[in-house]
Amino acid sequence: MALTVAQLMDALPESEDREIEELAVADRVADPRSLASMWPVPVGRFHRLRLLGTLQAKIGAAYLFHWVRGWFRNAEENKRLLAETHWKTALRVLDSMTYLRGAVMKLGQMLATLPNVAPKEFIEALDCLYFQAPPMHWSLLRELVHNELGDDPENIFASFDKQAFAAASLGQVHRARLKTGEDVVVKIQYPGIARTIREDMRNLALFMLPSRLNRDWDCLKDQVDDLCLRMEYETDYEREASTQEAVRKLFSEDDGIVVPRVFREYSTSRVLTMERLDGVHLDEFMATNPSDDVRNEFARKLLRSGYRMSYTGRLMYADLHPGNFLFMPDGRLGLLDFGMVVPIEGEFWELMRRMDRGFSTGVQADRINGIKEWSWITDERQDAEPLRLLDQFTDWTWRSRSTIGEYDFCDEAEFRRGIDLFLALLRTRFARGRSQTLSISRLNFGLASFLYRLKAKVAVLPIAEQEVRATGWDRSEYALRCDA
Amino acid sequence: MRITTEAKAAMRLKIVETAKLLFAERGFEQTTTRDIAQAAEIATGTLFNYFPTKEAIVQELVDEALRAAEVRLSEQTSSSAGTDLEVSLDEELFAIVAAGLRALKPLRTYLSALWQTVFSPLASATDDSDSFRARHLECVSSVLVRHGFSADVAPNVLQLYWTLYTGVLVFWTSDKSPKQEDTLALLDQSMRMFAGWLIAERPPSRRKKSSA
């Protein structure tokens, strides 16, 4: 469905709001988070529902409007409008997210992993959410720790940093030292956040009601139900601790990949205490102008960690954003945050085995077979266009996997192509697929954008082929040879 | 025979401790003043000499718990004095209420006995100066003064605070969330809202650096 300029103009906020809006924006430029953090968190479902809807409309309208307007303006003015639109949108998003905390913030994090969909200013504002969300003050933390661990933090730990060094949608992270001498980080969840997320997810389901008329409703519903379940998992730190321990066992010292040790006796479903790793995140790492070799070595570790988790651990890391990886000074890669890890078990694992050929050979016929099975594509005429787009998108997603030799992840045109294909797919409103489609999309986009930002150029095939052996699958008929 | 002050105090303590045990065992509603007198091995009439109602015993228990919380809070404040972290107004108010909630935890299930009296939003402002309400508001006032507000805090400001505070208490007693975590969120947001409003209401020349 093509939108007209008039429709997009209509979708923008009313003109009488403009003056108030400009005032509000000017007010917040100094520190966009300061104002929002003073707002009370809305508790009524309908109040939140209205906010969420407004937020989606505003972001969507602002971006679509910009894209369309851009076709009619000269470059210089376009640039000005671009910055203006991005900044205003970023501010709106930041405000609304701080306000709503829960699931909407996660949505922001998902957007922030797509550098070319979301422009630089937008990403910078959203990136703040990883580490600079409004903190819980010390007195609240003390009560939470007392509730969870049975005593005040100053009695339980040898030292406990009152200032959070990282904060995100679900919790905030403090440095501490155990009485036995280990340096740790303690992740503490904001009280009641789990219920907030459930509410947001129910709201999301309400927004999707118009899609019920769509023939792909059941699949879409399955996928959203799956995401709801994962989000609930993510609020359970006990579950996260178990996953983290399972993943930790997958790597040896030679891999150069580290997963922090969990201290169970200082952890509950709302508090997670783990070993502290030294290192920096992606942006800080890139600011040091690392050499190609150093960047590519980290990229190989990142890829290996993903394949190891999938093929040996049968776990899928569905929260692949820069805040979850540490570039350690000794060259090791630190993996953090295991709340959003999806088990690949039963039927899903069996499906993975059957899909292997389709996604690893790079041959179109194999790929089409795989897509047809994954998305229940028929030979009906209305499925022809989605199949064509899915084929191109799947090719884009998995091409690095079947490329002999190095694959250049920082090819901007290629990255752009993937985003355009993804948007084209969204426009077809084709939503058939397995319940894991959303998680896999997050993983693939997250990986592609991470490696793009890391400016990586590495051979993926040898790593993937080495790791896939752990499955024991018979691949003799189709496996690619790395030395071919 | 004259009863000494010490003996009176000992008797009060005995009644209160006995009542505490019975409330915990049977629940507040199921415990009568006769039960308490019987368990304390005194005549019901003697009990009434000390406490005219069952609610008055609860009030004594609450008062005792809150006095202990006040001591703990002042120790905490003095031990953290001189640290680099600047404590915001909303955090200080949060800490006062949270210390009280901790102390009241064993009494949570029968606190509702005091909704009409001590913890009523309408509790009289002209109560004697040693009442819990007076002591609590005195503590709040001193925090406000520390954050640059004038020493004669307007009565409506304190009334508004008290209404919020008693609201949080009522919510807490019926909070069914795990470990009453929803109360912590409500308290955090209530104090943030109150402090934010107070700072916004302050004349611009006096706003300075104080933050919500």
Image (tube, coloured by chain):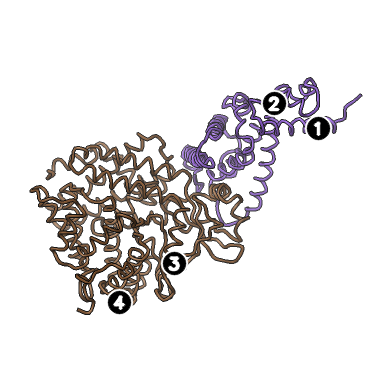
3 vs 2, front mark: 3
Q: How far separated are the C-alphas under marks 3 and 2?
A: 60 Å
The vertical placement of A170 against A209, above or below, is below
Earlier in the chain: of badge 4 and badge 3, it is 3
Q: What's under tag 4, amino acid-wise?
A: Asp
Q: Is residue A265 visible to the viewer in this orientation of the structure? A: yes
Give the chain letter for purple.
Answer: B
Give the residue pinned by disc 3.
A249
Give the chain letter for brown.
Answer: A
| Quadrant that contains the N terminus of chain A | top left
Q: What's under tag 2, amino acid-wise?
A: Ala
User: Which secondary structure, mark 4?
Assistant: helix
- Whether residue A331 sits left or right of residue A211 in the image: it is right
- Whether residue B178 sits left or right of residue B146 in the image: it is left
User: Which secondary structure, mark 2?
Assistant: helix
Q: What's under tag 1, amino acid-wise?
A: Ala
User: Which secondary structure, mark 1?
Assistant: helix
Give the residue pinned by disc 2.
B56
Please give the label number shown on residue A451: none
Q: How far separated are the C-alphas under marks 1 and 3?
A: 63 Å
Q: Chain of mark 3?
A: A
The vertical placement of A147 against A178, above or below, is above
Query: Contact, CB < 8 Å: mark 3 with mark 2?
Result: no
Give the residue pinned by disc 4.
A292
Q: Chain of mark 2?
A: B
| Quadrant that contains the C terminus of chain A | bottom left
4 vs 3, front mark: 3
